[in-house]
Amino acid sequence: MARLKLTARPIGSEDIEPSEEERRQLSEGEEDLANVEADPSDLMGSREKPPPTLIFGQSWATQELVESYEQKGYFGPGVCRAPGEEVTPDPRDGECVVFRDFFAAGLRFPLDPIFPKILARFGLRMHHLTPNAIVQLSKFFWAVKTFGGPVSVDAFCRLYEMHPQTRKVSFEEDSQVFSAQSGCCSFHPRRTNRTQGIERIELSFCQKNKWEDDWEQYWFYAKIGFPGADPSERVSYPLAAKVAEFRHITKADFRRTTAGYKECCSAFASAARVVSGRDIIEEYLAAKVWPLTRDWLPGTFSKIRVAGLSDQLPFPDFFLAEARRCF
């Protein structure tokens, strides 16, 4: 029985968020690699990349853990199940692989139907994501929707690029090091590219820098259904996926002429001017809303005044009462 153990990983530029000064120099310099459409691993010179592996190692997620999440309302009855003793996931029809810490990062079901469409643009499956990818997507959905915009797949591809993170693994009684094909992809703001007319727009940085070392050992299966637009249509499972080698897309193509693109970008840009990433997370936690779920947005908006701005901004009515101190 193979058990996964992490090995030491050299710290490189792909693992460190650039400083504000580095970002400024990139945006002003002529040597910005944002204009180079290539896999970052192909730009690493002669450093040899370990061979890929599809082995996850035996999961530490128990049926008791899955049932506790079900009782907490993270997902409905029968949606998720714990694996057996398999070390390489073998999902059943309609299933995908998820990690325990996705739910700590804010994943809840049922999901917004835009979610699988975004992953598809980057050639991603659920098991490729890190918990911080869930955080980034949640902030995007919340920022756009609460500033009155529609969520657009093309706008997301304009605003974000996929960030691959090398994750090296080895196995008991085996000195060979492998490159994991899971838990290795997140999203970062798309870098400036003058050739394509792209300027970097971003919410201030806010995510958890360090998750538990063994977070990827807690994996289990989920069958995430998406009902059709018409009640007569069958439920579909677009996130269903087997575990296989993949070639990710770092910068996905997008079209500026699709419906909702301009409105989505405008709403996101408005949010980025006045709220931080931390503010956004605090907002949806206070409202007890999980941004990646469907149909959570109230139908009414109020105008609120923000310090430093002459115009009032729209914000959805969640009917939250102001906390009062009790003596």
Image (cartoon, rainbow, N blue to C red):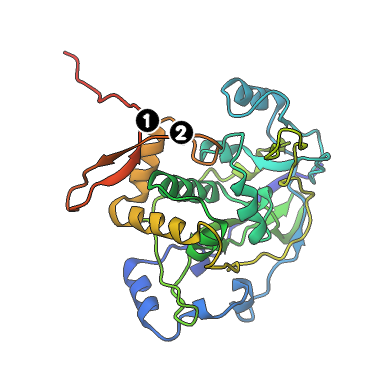
Which residue is drawn at the image coordinates 37% and 71% (left, top)?
23
Callout 2 secondary element: loop
Which residue is drawn at the image coordinates 40% and 55% (left, top)?
268
Neighbourhood count class around disc 2 (C-alpha, 10 Å): few under 14, some 14–19, many 20 upward: some
The percent position of residue 153, horizontal first and vertical second, equals: 57, 57
Q: Are marks 1 and 2 in contact (CB under 8 Å)?
A: yes
Residue 126 visible here: yes
Residue 12 visible here: no
Give left or right: position of 149 versus 72: left
Residue linked to disc 1: 318
Depth check: give the residue in front, 22 or 236: 236
Give left or right: position of 117 versus 87: left
Which residue is drawn at the image coordinates 70% and 28% (left, top)?
62
The percent position of residue 79, horizontal first and vertical second, equals: 71, 30
Q: Quadrant of the N terminus?
A: top right
The amino acid marked with disc number 1 is Phe
Residue linked to disc 2: 289
Q: Quadrant of residue 325?
A: top left
Give left or right: position of 105 versus 110: left
Q: Quadrant of the C terminus?
A: top left
The image shows residue 208, relative to residue 326, as above or below, that is below
The percent position of residue 72, horizontal first and vertical second, equals: 56, 22
The percent position of residue 92, horizontal first and vertical second, equals: 83, 39
Q: Nearer the viewer, mark 1 or mark 2?
A: 1
Which mark sits nearer the N-terminus, 1 or 2?
A: 2
